[in-house]
Image (cartoon, rainbow, N blue to C red):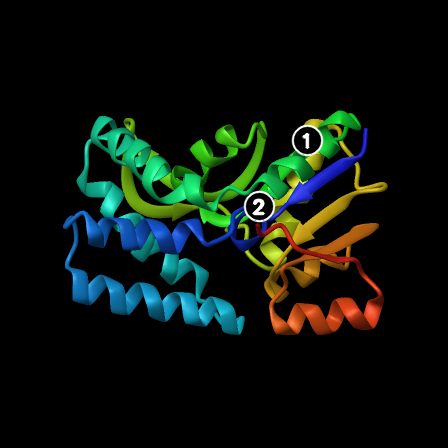
Amino acid sequence: MTLAIFDLDNTLLAGDSDHAWGQFLIDEGLVNADEVKAINDGFYADYQAGKLDIERYLCFALDFLAHKDPAELDTLHAHFMQRCIEPLITDKALALVDKHRQQGDTLLIITATNRFVTGPIAERLGIDNLIASEAERVDGRYTGQPTGVPSYQEGKITRLEAWLADHHETMVGAWFYSDSHNDLPLLNRVDHPVAVDPDDTLRAVAERNAWPIISLRE
């Protein structure tokens, strides 16, 4: 079977789930609004510029989880899904996923955003396989620290290679859909790279290499 790999934020979603989670916590009055917004926006700008310190960012993003009971976090996430994520899911994205599903391809989301945020989103999209940055848990509770290799830039290749070995899959004929120049290491490794609503840097590379450029926005 052929592997169909999808980035999540600003690719399958018409927005960024990680940044949206931070804004959701602000809107719910669960964090210091001014402090968190400034830090969250700063990290997002670093990501767009391709200079994000992923370990530092994950420590910031995961800290909130360490102060809440898992059941409370599940309730919060369900509210987050309904309020913030559902509006970011487009018919075009669902149709693309379904096209690969109908072809019998193996579907996989690979994202730098942590698994707490993205796990339920992958389920909503009907995609069983997810590679995401991992949040450490001890005795069922989040510690607020990342663990393992973050699935960001070259880290996506490291994590994907481990996943391929575990699942007895190969990259032969693989597709990868992404919006970001941060994913160029993996885009350059697949047989079928596709730029989705790309940033300016990725658009230029895609045009130079004659890669398909598509939009999943409504």
Name the kind of residue labelled 1 in the image: Asp
Q: Earlier in the sequence, mark 2 or mark 1?
A: 2
Q: Secondary structure at mark 2?
A: helix
The residue at the point 56 percent across, 36 percent down is 130
| Residue 178 position within the rendered picture, expressed as x and y whole percent measured from the top left | 64, 54
Image location of residue 173, percent across then percent down: 85, 42
Where is residue 113 drawn, in percent x and y? 46, 49
Query: Is 216 in front, or is 177?
Result: 216
Question: Counting other residues with Cα less than 10 Å from the Cα at mark 1, is it few (<14), some (14-19), or many (20 or more)?
Answer: some
Q: Which residue is mark 2?
A: 12
Give above or below for 37 relative to 58.
below
99 sits to left or right of 30: right
Q: Which of 95 and 168 lies nearest the eye of the viewer?
A: 95
Choose between 177 and 96: the one closer to the eye: 96
Q: Quadrant of the N terminus?
A: top right
Give the tally of numbered discs: 2
**Residue lying at 18% horizontally and 66% vertically, measured from the top left:** 34
Spatial CA distance of label 2 from label 1 is: 12 Å
Residue farthest toward the front in the current orientation of the protein: 218
Query: Looking at the picture, which amino acid does disc 2 mark?
Result: Leu
Provide the residue designation for mark 1. Answer: 98
Against 8, residue 120 (above or below) is above
* CB under 8 Å between discs 2 and 1: no
